[in-house]
Structures are given as C-alpha cells and as structure tokens.
Image (cartoon, grey):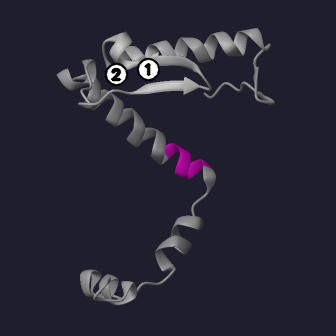
Amino acid sequence: GNSEPFLSLVENLTGAPLTGDAWVNELKQSVDTVLKEEKVKYEAKVAECAETEAAQEIDLDMRIRIVDGDEVLADTEMDGSFLATCKTFEKYVEERFAKNGGELIGYKQQKCN
C-alpha cells in the first residue's frame, strides 16, 4: 500500500499543495496560441530526431503483431523491423480508406495542415 497520501506526496515534492491553478492557467491560453506553441515544439523534435541514427531504426526488443480478428495486418517478425511493420500497417490503412471512399468505421478522412 501507499505509505503517504498522494496530496502529501505532491506537496513534499513540489513545496506547495496541489491546486488547479496550473490547469486554469493552461485553459486561459487561446487555441491558436497553444497550436502555434505545440507546432514549434513538434517541428523542433522532428528535426532533432531526423538527425539521429536511431531515427532510421527502432529496436523494441520484442515482436509486435497488429491483427484484425484472424487477419494479421503487420508483424515485426515477417516485416523485419518495427518501422517496416509501421509501413505495412500504414499501407493497409491507406488501402482500406481507398476501398471505402475515404471512410473508415463511419468517419470521413480529414486532412490536417
């Protein structure tokens, strides 16, 4: 069990009691401001990751199978790597969207900018 209540733990770690002030301050930001800030952070992380060798290969030290019922859609053992499995699944989803006129499970495909 827990030897210390959660709120006491937060106060001991931060030096202040837990309040909703931080959440309220986040909610005061406009959606446009948040989107701009997050886009900058996202693009910076994408650029940082693209420069590393790890971006070319991800080793999770495990087998991953993506299945739909009895159908195996993608499998790291068959595809050879995690990223190859991601590509296989991505191709499956794109083909499924195309077959259903851009609809998947009742939702229309939407493009993001």
Q: Is residue 42 above or below residue 57?
A: below
Which quadrant of the rendered structure holds the N terminus?
bottom left
Is residue 67 within the magenta segment? no
Q: Position of residue 106 (x, y in %)?
A: 81, 30
Amino acid type at circle 2 is Phe
**Which structural element holds mark 1?**
helix
Q: Residue at the spot x=55%, y=45% of the render? A: 35
Number of the label disc, if any, that sits on residue 7? none
Q: Which residue in the protein does label 1 denote?
A: 86
Q: Give the range drawn in magenta.
A: 32-36
Where is residue 47 drawn, in percent x and y?
Answer: 31, 28
Label 2 neighbourhood size at 10 Å, few (<14), some (14-19), many (20+)? many
Kindly tell me whether residue 17 is visible in this rendering.
no
Q: Is the magenta stretch mostly helix, strand or loop?
A: helix
Quadrant holding the C terminus: top right
Query: Which label is found at residue 82?
Result: 2
Callout 2 touching callout 1 (CB < 8 Å): yes
Seen as rendered, the residue at the extreme front is 70
Above or below — where is 18 with respect to 81?
A: below
Q: Which residue is drawn at 33% across and 27% down?
A: 63
Could you say which is closer to the camera, residue 106 or residue 71? 71
